[in-house]
Each structure stands twice: as C-alpha cells, then as structure tokens.
C-alpha cells in the first residue's frame, strides 16, 4: 500500500508520485512494502530533523524505515516541497521532477541504501537513483 498525504498548499499529483514509488519498490522486489509519503511545511520538517537527526534546520527529505513486523506498519518518506524548490536552482529540473528525485532518494533510504556510510555505498545509491529517475 502506498499512501500520499499532502499537508501543504503544494499541488501534489498523487497518481504520479504513487507511480514513482511503485516503480522503485517493484524494481527492488519490494512490491508489497507499505509506504507513507507525506508533504510537509519547512517548520514541520525542521522539527522532525531536529528531533531525529539533531539538525535544527529544514531539509528536503527524511526517511523512516518500518522497525517491526507489525502488520500494516508503514515506512515513511517525508518531503518538503519548499526546500526542494530551492534545490531546483542548481539542478535546473522542473519542481515535479526534483520532488520525484527526492522521493526516489527517500525510498532507497527506507530500503536500506545509505550514502552517508561513504565509499561504495555512495556510488551504489547514486546509481540506483539515476536508474529509477530515468524511468519516470
């Protein structure tokens, strides 16, 4: 199950973002994974970033894996369109594509990829991000 919650005034194409999530999950053989995708304000993501990562600033995406085998538990990807919009200045991508890129990034984190470990993990995750981004 893929759930999309928009808690912002950003226009969210739920069908498109569900489709992006499905492509990544299917490609990683995780088609039955439960995932919740939330779009939040800079203030909300800053609070979460401070609480869970000890970084007192807004960020573009946060990911939270499901931690138990409780039936119906969801992994979460939380996106902040306002911060992602700032990323488009350097990426030159349309906002919708940049949000999709960050969604792919977040889902890969939920599935265990972690560029913050450095080394080969950085390359492995970047390759996956590029692969799935080309498919949208």
Image (spheres, helix red, strand yellow):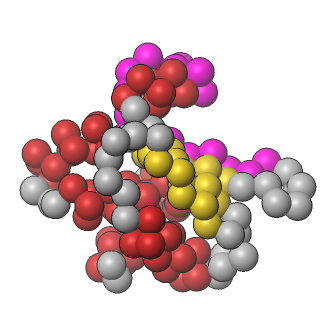
- The vertical placement of 48 against 26, above or below, is above
- The vertical placement of 85 against 33, above or below, is above
Q: Position of residue 56 (x, y in %)?
A: 44, 17
Magenta span contains residue 53: yes
Q: How many numbered badges does the structure rendering display? A: 0
Magenta span contains residue 126: no
79 vs 71, left or right, is left
Q: Is residue 81 visible?
A: yes
At horizontal 10% and vertical 45% (from top left) the residue drawn is 89
Name the quadrant of the C terminus.
Answer: bottom left
Q: Position of residue 16 (x, y in %)?
A: 39, 72
Q: Position of residue 123 (x, y in %)?
A: 39, 63
Query: Where on the picture, by quarter, is residue 30?
Result: bottom right
At horizontal 37% and vertical 29% (from top left) the residue drawn is 42
Q: Is residue 117 visible?
A: no
Q: Position of residue 4 (x, y in %)?
A: 54, 58
5 vs 73, left or right, is left
- The vertical placement of 110 against 86, above or below, is below
Instruction: Please tell me which residue lies in front, 128 or 23.
Output: 23
Name the quadrant of the N terminus.
Answer: bottom right
Which range of residues does the magenta coloring cover?
A: 49-67
At horizontal 85% and vertical 51% (from top left) the residue drawn is 68
Instruction: Please tell me which residue lies in front, 124 or 48.
Output: 48
Instruction: Name the residue furthest right.
Output: 70
112 vs 90, left or right, is right
At horizontal 49% and vertical 70% (from top left) the residue drawn is 18
């Amino acid at each position: 199950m893929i759930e999309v919650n928009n808690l912002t005034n950003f226009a969210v194409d739920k069908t498109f973002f569900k489709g992006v999530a499905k492509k990544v999950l299917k490609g990683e053989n995780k088609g039955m994974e439960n995932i919740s995708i939330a779009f939040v304000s800079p203030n909300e993501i800053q609070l979460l970033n401070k609480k869970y990562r000890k970084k007192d600033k807004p960020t573009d995406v946060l990911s939270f894996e499901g931690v138990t085998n409780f039936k119906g538990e969801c992994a979460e990807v939380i996106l902040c369109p306002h911060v992602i919009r700032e990323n488009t200045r350097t990426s030159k991508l349309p906002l919708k594509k940049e949000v999709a890129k960050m969604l792919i990034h977040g889902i890969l984190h939920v599935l265990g990829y972690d560029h913050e470990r450095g080394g080969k993990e950085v390359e492995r995750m970047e390759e996956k991000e590029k692969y799935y981004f080309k498919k949208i």
